[in-house]
């Protein structure tokens, strides 16, 4: 009777508290008397995932995930752009021509292009962490196997397989990283992860300078010498291997587990985050379950698909809406610009160490880039020198490549300061305009320092706009198409890298001035197209 009276006396007070808490974002828990199923009432209350992350707080897990994601992004850049130095150091072992160097540099990009869209679907069906671990490990295995290959064609094929495996890490890393942070922290964290890209561009020449300065070789067969450039491949793949080892200790993204309907596994993953950050379990925070996410019809189809043909059919059907009105015009413009940006930044960028290496060999005589390249052609046509292969990399090439990497990192910092006052459209147009002007000046400059400055600006200004353009794609297409839109846009960007690398290999030596002219005209075309995008500050 006393318990019943107490409940009746507190009814009005309880109703008032319920009204007060109704507008709160926190779950409402009505106090009950001891012995009236208190535990059952608390465990029935679910919590939103981001609310739980707020309760747990920013801690050790988030820092480790950021560091691991940075290493994965470094591995992708090392394995692709690192070939810019490998092609020079291996040219005597493989007896490569300029066209063959272009194909070798583009092999990993071809692999990424072929598997990116399929990897995007796999990461939503089997999860982020398993795909990152397995594909990165396979990429490391193929990369390690390539150091023992004495034949050019097989070496190129293995580099293609490396690209096919690391395709997932090139964009799934961002999804995995972002899902461990609340919304307000996500943009800043992803920006910090992008700094690892610039760090990688500096890491490649720094490690190459150390490794390739060694003068040794091991004769494995009569025709196969194991030389330092093969060891350099191991160092390029090392960040990815370290990242995989760390990922074994990290949980899967709880967000993707919930979207797959795995509530129990998602709760365990969040519980692991809580233990790593605070040493306490979710029960200590009065969190007993996570609110289930609503699956879209597309997600349900993908998760229940039993055959590869069903998945491929769904992939094709989902890509078609990208090319329908009203967003198709803006989307196609973004794709064309992205292709052009990668063509310049990665396509020509793969040849930057090679060109600077040739300039370093002619350091005693002030010459333009094309005059230096023409002089090398004259040397190759002479009967006395044509039989001599020189794969020496000059100190100037290392220093200039290291400067390029550091400048790329600095470019991201500068971009962060000017984006807000100028807006995305004006920022891209100015960057493309300055890059085109620097490309034009390369026809006339003789001073080595001026050449380096203009060449670096010509390459990095379009490169730092890749993240800006990706953000524009997200804003210009409907929400349900954004993931696929960014994936397709970046795939076409990789296609630009392949075209650019092979264009330089095919035409630079025969039509040097025309090649540079074509590239800076493309930059101007990108600037003109960027002006058509509705991404100004007002929009």
Image: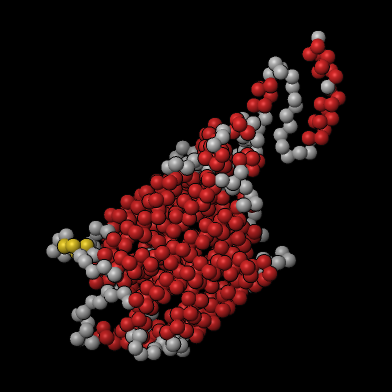
Q: Residue at x 29, y 70 (%)?
A: 213
Q: Position of residue 25 (x, y in %)?
A: 73, 39
Question: Can you say whether 273 is above or below 136 in the image?
Answer: above
Q: Can residue 519 be seen here?
A: no
Q: Position of residue 22 (x, y in %)?
A: 79, 35
| Total tally of numbered discs in the picture | 0
Q: Residue at x 20, y 86 (%)?
A: 383
99, 469: nearer the viewer:
469
Q: Residue at x 56, y 79 (%)?
A: 434
171, 270: nearer the viewer:
270
Tell me if 246 is positioned left or right of 429 in this view: left
Q: Position of residue 132 (x, y in %)?
A: 44, 48
Q: Residue at x 54, y 69 (%)?
A: 411
Q: Can residue 30 be seen here?
A: yes
When asked about the image quadrant of residue 507, the answer is bottom left
Tell me if 35 is positioned left or right of 118 in this view: right
Point out the residue furthest to the front here: 279
Q: Position of residue 325 (x, y in %)?
A: 65, 59
Tell me if 398 is positioned left or right of 8 in this view: left
Tell me if 295 is positioned left or right of 91 in this view: right
Point out the residue furthest to the top here: 1
């Amino acid at each position: 009777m006393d318990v019943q009276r107490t409940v009746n006396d507190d009814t009005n007070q309880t109703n008032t508290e319920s009204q007060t808490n109704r507008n709160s974002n926190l779950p409402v828990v009505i106090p009950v008397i001891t012995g009236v199923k208190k535990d059952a009432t608390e465990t029935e209350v679910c919590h939103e995932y981001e609310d739980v992350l707020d309760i747990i707080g920013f801690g050790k897990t988030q820092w480790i995930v950021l560091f691991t994601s940075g290493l994965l992004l470094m591995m992708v850049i090392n394995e692709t752009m690192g070939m810019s130095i490998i092609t020079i150091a291996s040219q005597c072992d493989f007896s490569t021509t300029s066209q063959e160097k272009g194909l070798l540099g583009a092999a990993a990009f071809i692999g990424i292009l072929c598997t990116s869209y399929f990897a995007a679907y796999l990461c939503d069906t089997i999860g982020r962490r398993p795909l990152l671990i397995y594909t990165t490990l396979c990429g490391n295995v193929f990369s390690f196997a390539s150091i023992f290959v004495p034949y050019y064609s097989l070496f190129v094929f293995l580099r293609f397989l490396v690209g096919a495996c690391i395709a997932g890490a090139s964009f799934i890393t961002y999804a995995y990283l972002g899902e461990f942070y609340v919304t307000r922290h996500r943009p800043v964290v992803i920006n910090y992860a992008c700094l690892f890209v610039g760090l990688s561009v500096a890491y490649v020449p720094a490690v190459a300078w150390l490794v390739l300065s060694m003068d040794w070789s091991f004769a494995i067969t009569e025709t196969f010498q194991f030389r330092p450039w093969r060891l350099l491949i191991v160092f390029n793949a090392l960040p990815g291997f370290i990242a995989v080892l760390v990922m074994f200790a990290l949980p899967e993204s709880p967000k993707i587990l919930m979207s797959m309907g795995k509530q129990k596994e998602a709760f365990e993953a969040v519980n692991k985050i809580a233990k790593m950050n605070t040493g306490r379990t979710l029960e200590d925070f009065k969190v007993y379950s996570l609110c289930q996410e609503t699956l879209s019809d597309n997600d349900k189809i993908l998760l229940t698909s039993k055959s590869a043909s069903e998945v491929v059919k769904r992939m094709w059907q989902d890509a078609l809406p990208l090319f329908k009105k009203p967003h198709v015009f803006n989307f196609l413009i973004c794709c064309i610009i992205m292709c052009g940006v990668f063509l310049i930044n990665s396509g020509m960028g793969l040849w930057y160490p090679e060109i600077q290496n040739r300039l370093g060999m002619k350091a005693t005589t002030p010459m333009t880039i094309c005059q230096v390249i023409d002089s090398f052609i004259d040397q190759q046509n002479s009967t006395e020198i044509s039989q001599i292969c020189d794969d020496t990399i000059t100190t100037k090439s290392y220093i200039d490549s290291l400067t390029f990497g550091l400048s790329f990192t600095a470019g991201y910092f500068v971009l962060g300061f000017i984006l807000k006052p100028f807006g995305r459209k004006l920022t891209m147009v100015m960057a493309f305009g300055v890059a085109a002007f620097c490309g034009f000046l390369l026809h006339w400059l003789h001073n080595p320092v001026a050449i380096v400055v203009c060449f670096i600006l010509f390459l990095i200004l379009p490169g730092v706009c890749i993240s800006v353009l990706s953000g524009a794609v997200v804003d210009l297409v409907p929400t349900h198409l954004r993931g696929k839109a960014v994936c397709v846009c970046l795939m076409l960007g990789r296609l630009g890298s392949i075209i650019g690398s092979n264009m330089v290999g095919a035409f630079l030596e025969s039509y040097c001035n025309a090649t540079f002219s074509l590239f800076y005209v493309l930059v101007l075309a990108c600037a003109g197209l960027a002006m058509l995008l509705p991404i100004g500050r007002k929009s």
